[in-house]
Image: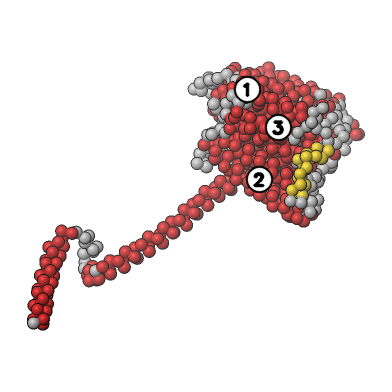
Amino acid sequence: MINPVPPFLIYLIGALLIPLLRGKAKKCLLVIIPIVAFVDLLHIPHGTYWTFPFIGYELIFGQVDKLSMLFSYVFVIMSFAGFLYALHVDDDLQHVAVMCYAGSALGVAFAGDLFTLYAFWELMAVASVFVIWADRSKRAIDAGFRYLMVHLFGGAVLLAGIVIYASQTGSIAFGRLGGNGIGFWLILVGFILNAAVPPLHPWLPDAYPAASVTGAVFLTAYTTKTAVYTLLRAFPGVEVLVYLGAAMTVYGVLWAIIENDMRRLLAYHIVSQVGYMVAGVGIGTGLSMNGSASHAFCHILYKALLFMGAGAVIQATGLRKMSDLTGRGLYKKMPLSLIFYMVGAFSISAVPLFNGFISKPMIVKAAEAAHNIPVFFLVHLASIGTWLCVGLKLPYYTWFGKPRSGAKEIEAKKPPVNMLWGMGFLAFLCIAIGIYPDVLYRILPYPVNFHPYAPPHIIGTLQMLLMTGVGVWLLLGKLAPHAVINLDTDWFYRKGASLFVKFCYGMSSVRTGMQNLSIDLVDGVITVSKNPIYAVESLFSKKKHGMPPYNADTYRQAIGKGVMVSIILFCVLCLLLFARLTQLSK
Amino acid sequence: MRILKILLLASIVIVCFLGFLVYPGDESHYFWEKIPVFEAVFGFIGCIVLIVFAKILGRFFLERRENYYD
C-alpha cells in the first residue's frame, strides 16, 4: 500500500531537484515526476485530509472528490506531454517555473478552503510569469510585466473577496459559495479574470504568444482551466456566467478571424473555448456541468497539441506570422507537424471521432435543453468560427497558401524528435477519448446520460463543417492574413499607462519650471545685492549686458594700491601711537 | 484542386441526403430540428456572417500598424 502525498509536493520537490541534476538525469526527472504524481493520484481516496489549524481556521490541502480528481488527472497528463515536448530545452529557469506552475495548479484543485486556494492561486501567477519570462526576449519580458500586473490585480480582488466573505459568513470552506454580498461578487471577479472573460481577457492573447515555444504549451493548460475548476465548484448556476460565456465564445472567434500571429490566433480560441465552459457552469444542470468539466479535460489536450504544432513551425522556421509563412510550401517540409496539428484542429472543431465531439455538444445540448435559445445559437455560431479559423484558415495559410511570386521556398530546420513524441502522445489521447468516450465519462462529477454518436448529431455536425468549408472557399481572399495587429481591451491599460507616464512627465516639467523660476529669482537678488548701482545702471542703459564676470587681473592694481595705502596708514598710526606712549611715560 | 472541389460537393450532397434519412420527426422540440438540412444552411450563413462581421470590425476599428504600441 502506498501512502499518498499531496501531489503539489511532488512537483515542488521536482522543482528543487532540477538545478541539481545534469544531462540525461535531468531529462529523466522531467518525465518521471508526472508519472510519480499520476501513480500518487491513483492512490488518493476521496475525502478531506491534510488539514492544518491556522489562526482559528482550518487549512485543507486535500479536499478530494470526482471534480478535483478529474482536473488533477488532466493536469498531470498535460505536464507529462509538455515535458516530453520540452525535453530538448536546457533551461533550468523554465523547467523549475513550469514545475511550480503545474504543482500550484494541482494545489488549487485539491484546496479545501479559500486561504489555501488563494496561496496556490498567487503562486500560480508568479510561477507562470517566470514561464513567460523564460523566453528572455523583449516582447516576452514586456508582456510578462503586463501579465503580472493584471494577475496581481486579480489576486488582490480575490483576496479582498475572500476576506469580506469570511468575515461575513464566518466560513472559509471552498465549496458552493452562498449569499449575494460583495465578497461573493469579488471572488467571482477574481476567478473570471483568470478564466479570461472579456473584457478582463487581454492578458491571455498578449502573454501566451510571447512565451517560448515550449513554455506556451504549459501556459495554455493551467491558468484558465483552474479558473474553470473553481467556477465549477463555487459558482454553479450563477446566471450571469451563461451570458458572459456565450458572448466570449463569439468574441474569441471574431478576433481570431482577423489575427495574423499563429499562436495569438490559437490564444483567442482559448478565450472562445473557455466561453463554452463558463456558459456550462452558468447553466448549472448536471449535463452542462459535466459538459464544462469534460470540455476542460479535452480542451487541455487538444489546445496544447495545437500550440505544439504551431510551436514546431516556429522552432523550425523562426517565423510566427502567417503572412510570412503563406505560399512557401511548408507542407513539403513539415508534414508530420501538419498531421498532428490537424488532429488538434479536428478535436477543437468537434469532428466525430475526436475528443471535442464528445464534450462540447454536451454544453450546446444543455443550453438547448435549458431553453436558452440565444445562448444556444451563439455557442453554435462559435463552433462554426472555431472550425473556420483553427481548422481551415490557420493550416491553409501556414502550410499551404497561394505561391507568391518572389517568395523563396521556406527553409525549415528539423525540429527535435522529442517534440514529435509530445505531439504524438497528445494526438493519441485526443483520438482515443474521441473513439472511446466512456473512459472520460466514467470520471465525470455527475452521472452521464449522453450519447454523442447519435446519427442525427453526427450528420448535423458533418453538414455544418462541410458547408463552412464552402463558405471559407468562397471568401478565402478575405481571410488572407496581413501584417497588422488588432486592438483589444488591453488598449485601455497600455495606452492608459503611456498617458499616465506623459502626465507624470508633465507634472515633472511643471516642477522643474518652478525650480528654475526660483533659482532665477535668487540670482536676481544676488546681482542686486552685490552691486546695486550696477544693477540700477543696467536697468537704464541701452546696452543690456549683465554684470561683467569677475577677473582678478582687472582689479589687482586697484586692490594692491588700496592695500599698500592701508599698510602705510597703519604703520604711520603705529608710529604716532608709539611716540605718544613714550611721551606719556616720561 | 478540382478533385477537392468535386469531393467537397459530393460529400455535401451525401450528408444532406443522410440528413433526410435520420430526420427525427415529431421528437423535435424546435422548428429547426424539423429541417433536415438546417445545420448545412446554418453553417454556411454563419460562416459568411462571421467573416464579414470580423473583417468590418478589423478594417474600421481594430487594425493598426505592427509597431503601434512601441
Residue B19 location (% of width, % of height): 83, 27
The residue beneath circle 1 is A25
The residue depicted at 75 percent of the width and 55 percent of the height is A167
Q: Mark 3 and 1 residues: CB-CB less than 8 Å, in contact? A: no
Residue A578 location (% of width, % of height): 10, 76
Residue A112 location (% of width, % of height): 78, 43
- Amino acid on which disc 1 is placed: Ala
- Amino acid on which disc 3 is placed: Ile
Q: CA distance from mark 2 to mark 1?
A: 42 Å
- Mark with earlier residue (3, 1): 3
Residue A10's disc number:
3
Up/down of A40 relative to A250, above or below: above
Q: Is residue A261 visible?
A: no
The residue depicted at 63 percent of the width and 48 percent of the height is A153
User: Under tag 2, what secondary structure?
Assistant: loop
Question: What colour scheme does the image use?
Answer: secondary structure
Q: Mark 2 and 3 residues: CB-CB less than 8 Å, in contact? A: no
**Residue A523 appears in which quarter of the rendering?**
bottom left
The residue depicted at 13 percent of the width and 64 percent of the height is A560
Please indicate whether residue A478 sits to the left or right of residue A138 in the image.
right
User: Under tag 3, what secondary structure?
Assistant: helix
Please indicate whether residue A210 sits to the left or right of residue A272 in the image.
left
Up/down of A72 relative to A353, above or below: below
Q: Which numbered mark, 2 or 3, is in the foreground of this view?
A: 3
Q: Are marks 2 and 1 on the same chain?
A: yes
- Judging from the image, mark 3 belongs to the subunit labelled A
Residue A200's disc number:
2
Up/down of A261 relative to A60, above or below: above
- Mark with earlier residue (2, 1): 1
